[in-house]
């Protein structure tokens, strides 16, 4: 299996099966995870192929992406992902046929030199107010003229372009030039729906790193540590092993575990507190590990109320995971999912499950009580990666238990990707 050196990940080529998706990514060696080798060229080429297949199926001849995760999906390139998430500093033009044109942040063209998915690199024309101030109208016209020329050159006479994210001035300027804008978010969601073999390996690696961080968190969970100090262990491990960021700050303790969706704080964790968290981690290659666990801090025996909460969340999670098989519809899952009784139902989360890849992705499957107002239907397909959620709180105990598992959809039983143990002693 190789040798662990200086706490760095060991790449184990022989662990990969003929299908390229060995479960060995969940094994740890020494102080760090054992990671599967990912063929980055194959990863990137497969994603662009899937994207173009989705474009062809929807009749789109060109697409423009600003979302950094969509740029990465189309090109395999990454640059200042979090910054680019709120500053429109780079974008990519993807024709159905012809060269992909990456518009890169000024001075960063060398980052993508020679990349197989990128046919041409141009400097991005920035027209957000931070960098252009009162010259936004001037810059947006330069930008629109360049995009319109690309649509003319590669659209085959089609004056339409699918766009994932665009400020109003840009949309208006393209429309003024006779270009019709369609929904690029739906387009790329369709492409991302089913994961390729290299994507699944990257996801396994993200989970392996996440679970290494969770082990370090568990070791550090002693009464007197703050929520933020405990949370920092997951961040540190993720960065140490090539990860990128964590999407949320969902780690809470004691009375702050109820209601859910409170953010991590400087609260000091006490002996006997319930500690609940949701990893929302973006690891190496940009892939996500979304796992939730709830632990009891210190040596105090769990109370009967804490055990009741944990057993409720555990029962819901195990029941619902078993429903996720290829061919099941979202509505069937919603109808057959575990129905919490009162008082638990009043504090349940709307989402039963969601997809994940490069961050959280399509689909979002809602519970029966939220289906009529916001649910939508589709069919599970083998190769989809799904996170199944459970939260239990009764409003009496004053605490809440959050559990979440990441699974791979198959024709038969789903494959459990997240291997960190649940707290069986609390059952």
Image: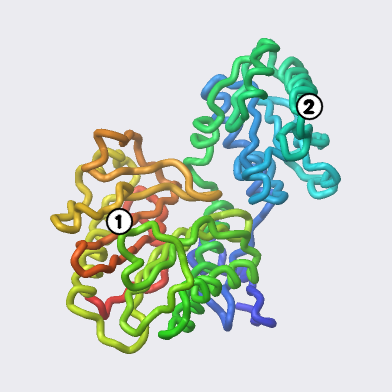
Q: Residue at x 55, y 49 (%)?
A: 358
- In the image, 325: left or right of 227? left
**Regarding mark 2 in the picture, which secondary structure is present there?**
helix
Q: Secondary structure at mark 1?
A: helix
Q: Position of residue 22 (x, y in %)?
A: 51, 63
For the N terminus, the image quarter is bottom right
Mark 1 or 2: in front is 2
x and y percent of residue 360 in the render? 48, 48
Residue 159 is at least partly visible in this image: no
Front residue of 143/237: it is 143
**Which comes before the other along the chain, label 1 or label 2?**
2
Question: Residue at point 43% right, 78% down?
Answer: 268
Q: Residue at x 37, y 82 (%)?
A: 270
Residue 240 seen in this snapshot: yes
Colour scheme used in the picture? rainbow
Query: Residues under labels 1 and 2: Cα distance?
Result: 50 Å
| Vertical position of residue 267 compared to residue 82: above or below | below
Q: Is residue 145 left or right of residue 264?
A: right
Return the mark for residue 150. Answer: none
Judging by the rendered image, the residue that carries numbered circle 1 is 321
Residue 29, percent from left and from top:
56, 80
Q: How many marks?
A: 2
| Residue on which the image places disc 2 | 139
Question: Who is closer to the viewer here, 75 or 221?
Answer: 221
Q: 401 above or below 423?
A: above
């Amino acid at each position: 299996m190789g040798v662990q050196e200086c706490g760095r990940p060991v790449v184990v080529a022989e662990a990969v099966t003929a299908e390229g998706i060995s479960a060995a990514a969940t094994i740890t060696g020494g102080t760090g995870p054992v990671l599967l080798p990912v063929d980055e060229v194959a990863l990137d080429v497969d994603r662009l192929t899937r994207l173009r297949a989705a474009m062809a199926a929807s009749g789109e001849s060109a697409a423009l992406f600003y979302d950094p995760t969509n740029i990465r999906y189309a090109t395999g390139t990454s640059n200042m992902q979090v910054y680019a998430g709120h500053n429109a500093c780079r974008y990519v033009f993807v024709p159905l046929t012809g060269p992909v044109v990456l518009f890169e942040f000024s001075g960063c063209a060398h980052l993508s030199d020679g990349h197989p998915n990128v046919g041409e690199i141009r400097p991005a024309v920035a027209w957000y107010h931070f960098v252009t101030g009162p010259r936004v109208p001037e810059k947006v016209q330069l930008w629109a003229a360049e995009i319109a020329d690309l649509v003319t050159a590669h659209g085959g006479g089609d004056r339409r372009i699918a766009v994932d994210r665009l400020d109003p001035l840009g949309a208006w300027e393209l429309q003024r030039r006779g270009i019709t804008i369609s929904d690029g978010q739906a387009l790329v969601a369709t492409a991302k729906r089913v994961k390729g073999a290299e994507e699944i390996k990257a996801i396994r690696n993200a989970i392996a790193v996440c679970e290494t961080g969770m082990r370090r968190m568990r070791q550090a969970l002693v009464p007197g540590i703050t929520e933020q100090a405990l949370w920092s262990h997951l961040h540190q491990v993720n960065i140490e092993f090539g990860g990128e960021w964590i999407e949320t700050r969902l780690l809470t303790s004691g009375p702050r575990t109820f209601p859910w969706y409170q953010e991590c704080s400087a609260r000091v964790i006490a002996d006997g507190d319930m500690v609940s968290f949701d990893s929302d981690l973006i690891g190496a290659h940009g892939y996500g590990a979304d796992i939730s666990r709830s632990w009891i801090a210190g040596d105090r025996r769990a109370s009967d109320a804490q055990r009741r909460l944990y057993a409720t969340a555990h029962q819901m999670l195990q029941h619902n995971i078993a429903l996720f098989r290829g061919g099941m519809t979202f509505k069937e899952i919603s109808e057959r999912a575990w129905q919490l009784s009162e008082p638990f139902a009043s504090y349940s989360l709307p989402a039963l499950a969601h997809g994940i890849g490069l961050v959280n992705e399509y689909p979002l499957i809602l519970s029966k009580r939220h289906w009529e107002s916001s649910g939508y239907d589709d069919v599970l397909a083998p190769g989809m990666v799904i996170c199944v959620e459970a939260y239990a709180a009764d409003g009496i105990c004053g605490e809440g238990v959050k559990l979440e598992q990441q699974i791979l959809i198959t024709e038969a039983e789903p494959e459990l990707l997240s291997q960190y143990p649940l707290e069986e002693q609390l059952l």
